Image: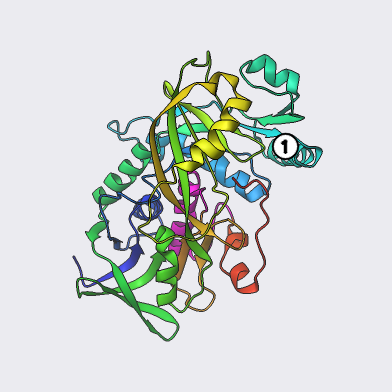
Amino acid sequence: MQDSYDVVIVGGAVMGSSIAWALSASDGFDGSVLVVERDPTYANASTTHTNSCMRQQFSNPLNVQISRFSADFVRNFRERLGGDPEIPDIFTHHFGYMYLAADERFADALRRNHAIQAGLGSGTRIMSPAEIKADYPFYNVDDIICGSHNLTDEGYFDSGTMFDWWRRKARQNGVTYITDEVVDLVISAGRVTSALLASGREVGCGTLVNAAGPRAVEVARMAGATLPVEPRKRYTFIFDAAEPLDRALPLTIDPTGVHMRSDGDAYMCGCTPDADPAVDYDDFAMDHDIFEGKVWPVLAHRVPAFERLKVTSQWAGHYAYNTLDHNVVVGPHHETENFIFANGFSGHGMQQSPAIGRAVSEWIAYGEYRTLDLTPLGYQRIVDGEPFVESAII
């Protein structure tokens, strides 16, 4: 370990590792990179508890473009990482998302979003109840006006392999990973000059990247920044059905907010709890009443074959939840110019990580975004209190 690095990344989960790899592979950057990760097991990281889904069905064109790049990155993963024959293909299951509308207001929103998505090359289509029933006979669509579905580059992907190989390749390219925790920053003349670690070491840095997931607000405070990000608990359940479906279940967004999808030979489901406060960083306790009280009645109504099922696994994970607008904050602080945000993904982090890694590496290497301008997702909107408008939030 050196005494100083050109870039220090706080957090080594999927976002920090995406940025670390992208920097190490950039033609415009030949500096040193240190990744500081407090728990290298990632036991409670949002990365570990992800449902590994990817969609293009957003309402804001920028989010659609981010997702389209990420889908291409996953599809061409080996080539993106340099063509090493040892790198595996990323398994994907393009069963798509199926948004279901039960009222005209949401149906109109789906139609407007479809026009935006189609204009950017997405394969989204609006389906009538009869069309949904023809393709997926297991749905109950008696109370549905329309659905929005996309079978191209949308569904489940093996994010664990992507994360693993980002770390491997970053290390091969010279990135240093250490187990430690950044506990304070030294600021001088409007710049971060060094990071103080829990081990007692002080590490100089040219640029500091906040990729600390749900704990990002703590790192932001060290730089005197206010960041509206907090940990929110989300619940996931795996279940077997007594009457398995005869085809893959798309990731279905029910009008109630409950979501469900195929998961190998089993099924996965979850929801946002009705009471959704910020929680402690180490609070991963399950609420066992949510499945019986909220989730299962919706499953049985929407897919009658799910009336008889058995939960086989369940867990709670944390969203790094942006309370302003549920979207990522990325790019430099408006005053401490070498403090870079990559925070507040609100459940979109895994699917957006390829594009965010590329964007942050471009900013550090060139001082600008060179492929996709993410300025609208920058910290200035937090200062101004102006939300980035995105209506397709799960």
Q: Position of residue 46 (x, y in %)?
A: 40, 50
On the image, numbered disc 1 is attached to which residue? 114
Q: Is residue 92 left or right of residue 134?
A: left
Q: Is residue 246 above or below residue 224?
A: above
Q: Mark 1: give few (<14), some (14-19) or many (20+) Cα within 10 Å.
A: many
Q: Please give the name of the residue rendered at 60% of the width and 39% of the height, measured from the top-left corner.
A: 56
Q: Is residue 35 left or right of residue 390?
A: left
Residue placed most toward the observer, 293 or 3: 293
Q: Is residue 137 above or below residue 196?
A: above
Quadrant location of the N terminus? bottom left
Quadrant location of the C terminus? top right
> Does the magenta run of residues contain 350?
yes
Q: Is residue 383 left or right of residue 24?
A: right
| Magenta residue span | 346-372
Q: Is residue 59 above or below residue 377?
A: above
Q: Position of residue 221 (x, y in %)?
A: 43, 75
Residue placed most toward the observer, 100 or 376: 100
**Residue 154 visible in the picture:** no
> Does the magenta run of residues contain 267?
no
Residue placed most toward the observer, 307 or 270: 307
Residue placed most toward the observer, 44 or 304: 304
Q: Position of residue 239 (x, y in %)?
A: 43, 28
Q: Please give the name of the residue rendered at 41% of the width and 46% of the height, measured from the top-left corner.
A: 286
Say which element carries label 1: helix
Q: Amino acid at mark 1?
A: His
